[in-house]
Image: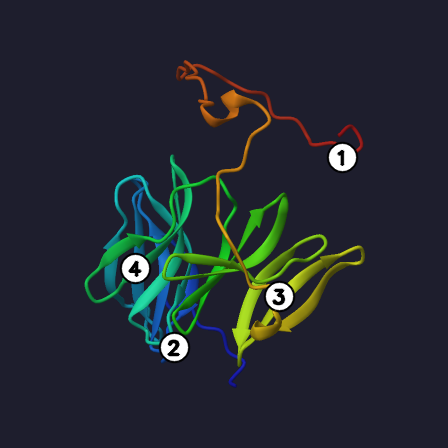
Amino acid sequence: KTKQKKTITYETRYYTPTLSPDLQHIACVEVDEANNSYLTIVDTYHGTKIKSIKSPIGIHIQQPQYHSSGEKIVAIGVSENGTTLVEIDLKNEKLELLLPWGNQQIERPIYYDDTIFFKTNIDNKDDIFSLNKGQIVRITDTQFGAFNPYVHQNKVYFNDYTLKGLKINHLTLNDSTAQTVRIDKIKTLYPNQNTFQIPAVATNGDTTYSISKYNTIAH
C-alpha cells in the first residue's frame, strides 16, 4: 500500500521466509556457522526472533509452509540419507518424518486442509502428488511435467511444462487421475552412484591460484 520497503532483520542467516496465516509471524530457515539447521519464527513487523526449533543432527529443512491453523509447518528434509517430507509441530517443537528417506527431488510442499500437496518425480517425470495419513495419490499426469502446486476451493493450480515452456494449468480435485502410488528410490545408472564420496584433498596454506579475466567466447 505504501510502496515502501523495510528491512526487518540484520546480519542474520535466514532464507525461504513464509508468512503465517494471521500475518503476524514469519517462519524461515536459519543455518548457523556450525551448519546446524533451525526453523526460526520472527515477528513480521520488527523482525524480533520469537523461537528457533533445531532440526535433528544432520537434517536440513527447506521450503517451509504453514498449515492454515498456524500450529504446524510442512517442509522438505534433506540429509545424507536423501530427501523426505517433514512436519514440525510449533507448539511441542517436534519434527516428524512423513515419508521414508529417498532420492527423489521433492519441491514446494503445501497444505490444503490436512492434505499435503507437493511435486516429486515418479516414472521419470515430475508431477503433483498429495499425502494424507500416509497415502500418496497422483494428482496430475502431465506429458512433460507439473510444478509449483497451489490449491484453492478444491482446484489445483500448477505450472504445466509444455513444448512452449511453462503454462498455468488447473484441474478440479474430483476430476484428477486420483491414482494411489508408492514412492520408491530412483534407480541409478551405476550402482556406485549411491555410495559416492568426495575424496579428501590435502591442502596447505601456501597454495596460490592465478586470477584471469573470464572469457565468454573461450567457454
Calculate the distance from the C-alpha at mark 4 to the C-alpha at mark 1. Answer: 46 Å
CB atoms of marks 3 and 2 within 8 Å: no
Name the disc covering residue 158, or none. Answer: 3
**Most extreme residue toward the left, as rendered?**
92
Kindly state the secondary structure of the residue where label 4 is placed. strand
Specify the amino acid type for callout 1: Thr
Query: Is 155 placed left or right of 109 in the picture?
Result: right
Taking depth in this image into account, of 171 and 9 the one nearest to the observer is 171
Q: Is residue 129 above or below residue 125?
A: below
Number of other residues with Cα within 10 Å of mark 1, as a class: few under 14, some 14 to 19, many 20 or more: few
**Circle nearer the N terminus (4, 3):** 4
Query: Is 72 placed left or right of 1 in the picture?
Result: left
Q: Quadrant of residue 163?
A: bottom right
**Circle nearer the N terminus (2, 1):** 2
Name the disc covering residue 21, or none. Answer: 2
Number of other residues with Cα within 10 Å of mark 2, as a class: few under 14, some 14 to 19, many 20 or more: some
Kindly state the secondary structure of the residue where label 3 is placed. strand
- Residue at figure coordinates x 31%, y 57% from the top left: 39
Calculate the distance from the C-alpha at mark 2 to the C-alpha at mark 4. Answer: 16 Å
Residue that badge 1 annotates: 216
Calculate the distance from the C-alpha at mark 3 to the C-alpha at mark 1. Answer: 36 Å
**Circle nearer the N terminus (3, 2):** 2
**Circle nearer the N terminus (3, 1):** 3
CB atoms of marks 4 and 3 within 8 Å: no
**Circle nearer the N terminus (4, 1):** 4
Query: Is 53 placed left or right of 214 in the picture?
Result: left
